[in-house]
Image: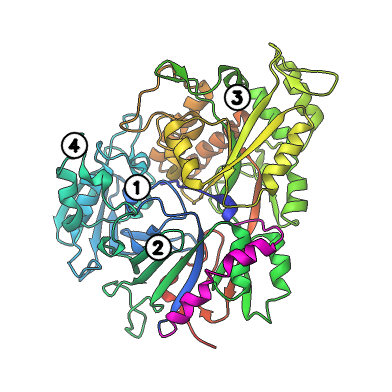
Amino acid sequence: MFAIFPSMRRWLVGLLTVVIAIALSSCNPNDFKSQAAQVTQLVDTIVGEPKTFNYALSSESPNVFSLIYEGLITENGVTAEIEPALAETWQISDDKKQIVFTLRQGLKWSDGIPLTADDVVFSFNDIYLNPDIPTSTRDGLQIGESKALPKVRKISDRQVEFIVPEPFAPLLRSAGGTPILPKHILAKTITTKDGEGKPQFLSTWGTDTDPKKVISNGPYKLDAYNTSQRVIFGRNPYYWRKDKQGNPQPYIERIVWQLVENVDTAVLQFRSGGLDILEIGPRTFRLLKREEKRGSFTIYNGGPSSSTMFITFNQNKGKRNGKPLIDPIKSRWFNTVEFRQAVAYGINRQAMINNIFQGVGEPQNSPIAVQSPYYLSRDEGLKSYDYNPQKAKELLQQAGFKYNDKGELSDAQGNRVRFTLTANTGGTGFIQAQIKQDLSKIGMRVDIQNIAFNSLVEKLDNTLDWDCVYLGFTGGVEPNNAANLWLPDGSSHMFNQKPQTGQTPIAGREIASWEAEIGRLYVQGAKEVDEAKRKAIYAETQRLTQEYLPFIYLVNPIGLLAVRDRIQNIKYSAYGGPIWNIYELKAVEK
């Protein structure tokens, strides 16, 4: 529900180099565009390879699923209002314990097979609610202290009923917005077991699958995937949307995602005409703004980002096979709240905004998106950490840390404070470099480790062998969509992660009292239907997250998007993203 993404994909571009230009000369996307000139298409970019084509097993973003799948409802990318998708209507009972969705007539999968209520029931009962399937979607559907799950029942070929044991405020968005998957393709993979007795589904639709065998219900279907080169989507001929004149949507026949190594490469490709669309950072904005008219493109301002950028420390005290996941010395540091607060005071976020983001952003303090009605601002009393290295040093000394005559920080046992900050290779290193420099001023030594995003996800989900990570999360208006992040047993509770299904057990993992309280409040907020009370509950969660700092938030940038003028009907917002309304975009040669 809450997907991890390589946030450096969006922001920050450094100096382009001759080396990059030479490297690109043999793989210019213009070559591909010329080969497909007779087909209307949009060429975008993605940093990092897709990890899976199986939605239920995905935990990363960007991913292919926003183009190939839909749920019963969707959200307007500008207003965040709920709109019909596969379901044309829905009814909620007076006691808020039942929703009945009515599907549109004539729905079909991309292979022409009818899409019915059987697919909806299968998607939930056999996949998302199946304890044998390790999917984060289930976290967002757990209800109350009992963690009960909805009961999903077919009423007719076009009607499906969701029943919950108690009022569950997020049910409409959580259940309705979850993609529906094809029963006629996947049912056998649930009942068929592999050599280890696990559902074959767990190895179904990996990236080694022929993309044409991945059946979709969204505006597009997968056509091709060339490792390290591109992902190609073709228009789904059975997609349900039509415009007011009865013309089938989407209008653009093909979407191409160029796989690039970093944002520098993406900017070079856009400037050379190889890309139609590019999310940009402030530094790139200054470069591209001068070329806007000459390059026949427009830069859109989408307002504040709905995502978060942060660093987090690994607070897991557990052991695997008798070996601590984290060096016990470092673990003591990371589990000291004064240590985390000192780091927050020690990072100069305003300098980050001024120098890296060119003033286009503001300090970020909350895990909840600014577009959400549950967002608590600094003006409303949310604690913030303005740059104050002296305060940081005082907190560290109060916690028993000491400085030598060189200003180097050690703990009470004399261990030099040194840790590794791991980040995704997909972006430039401006932010990591500043964090390293800032924390050196309060005596800490930070080593930077940049690795491929999939390797980073492996550390976060599986091996758990990391000190500190720089990452980001996507955001939304419904706080419960982050339940898998904040519930102590949630699948994305990265700062104190439990073992995933089928992994080696962890002994000695501890849950802090504040950590448990945040989880309890998220459960309470989900079952509260009174909006004023819900706001109060989520306000308290934000106060706790800023006091105890499981995540140290950095900057909330402004979303900026460069788009070729031949692409029409763009309705960009930082909340909805660049092509949330892909079905109504048009590509017109000028």
Q: How far across and how far down the image is residue 575, in percent?
A: 53, 58
Indicate which label's residue lies in the foreground, 1 or 3: 3
Q: Which residue is mark 1?
A: 171
Residue displayed at 77% across by 52% down: 355
Q: Amino acid at mark 4?
A: Gly
Q: Which residue is mark 3?
A: 334
Mark 3 closeness class: few <14, some 14–19, many ≥20 residues within 10 Å: many
Real-space Cα distance between discs 4 and 1? Answer: 36 Å
Q: Amino acid at mark 2?
A: Asn
Q: Is residue 556 left or right of residue 493?
A: right
Earlier residue among tags 2 and 4: 4
Q: Secondary structure at mark 4?
A: loop
Q: Which of the image's four quarters has the C terminus?
A: bottom right
Q: Is residue 390 left or right of residue 65?
A: right
Q: Secondary structure at mark 1?
A: helix
Q: Which residue is mark 2?
A: 226
Q: Secondary structure at mark 3?
A: helix
Q: How far across and how far down the image is residue 404, in percent?
A: 81, 18
